[in-house]
Image: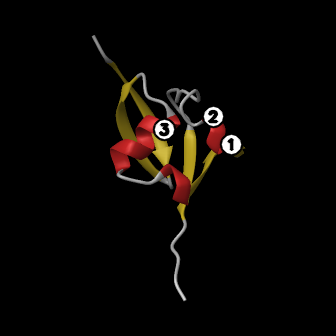
Amino acid sequence: MQTRLTVTLNGESRALDAPVSVSGLLELLGLDTRKVAVERNMEIVPRSTYIATMLADGDELEIVHFIGGG
């Protein structure tokens, strides 16, 4: 049985099925892990730990997506 958790993502409340990692959330959102920066509870999440960093109820996340151009 899956449980639900609620996080704040870029200022908006979002309900997710738990357990979910930062990597899983990015996949759910369709974002390339190589092109984003993630802050969780006011701390930068190192890209190398996205898979191991599990989200918890009440987490506050900011995700910045890098877009190239010229």
**Please, what is the three-letter code of the amino acid marked with disc 1?**
Pro
> Is disc 3 in contact with disc 2, using a CB cutoff of under 8 Å?
no
Q: Which residue is mark 1?
A: 46
- Percent x, y of residue 5: 41, 27
| Residue at horizontal 42 percent and vertical 22 percent from the top | 19
| Residue at horizontal 42 percent and vertical 54 percent from the top | 31
Q: Which residue is mark 2?
A: 49
Q: Which residue is mark 3?
A: 23
Query: In front here: 33 or 4?
Result: 33
**Please, what is the three-letter code of the amino acid marked with disc 3?**
Ser
SS at badge 1: loop
**Please, what is the three-letter code of the amino acid marked with disc 2?**
Thr
Please, is residue 69 above or below residue 26 in the view? below
Q: Quadrant of the N terminus?
A: top left
| Residue at horizontal 51 percent and vertical 73 percent from the top | 67
> Is disc 2 in contact with disc 1, using a CB cutoff of under 8 Å?
yes
Q: CA distance from mark 3 to mark 2?
A: 9 Å
Q: CA distance from mark 2 to mark 1?
A: 6 Å
Q: Quadrant of the C terminus?
A: bottom right
Please, is residue 6 above or below residue 10 in the view? above
SS at badge 2: helix
Q: Residues within 10 Å of mark 1 (few under 14, many from 20)?
A: few
- The colour scheme of the drawn protein is secondary structure
In the image: residue 24, left or right of residue 34: left
- Which image quarter: residue 17? top left
Query: In front here: 40 or 45?
Result: 45
| Residue at horizontal 42 percent and vertical 36 percent from the top | 24
- Percent x, y of residue 54: 54, 27
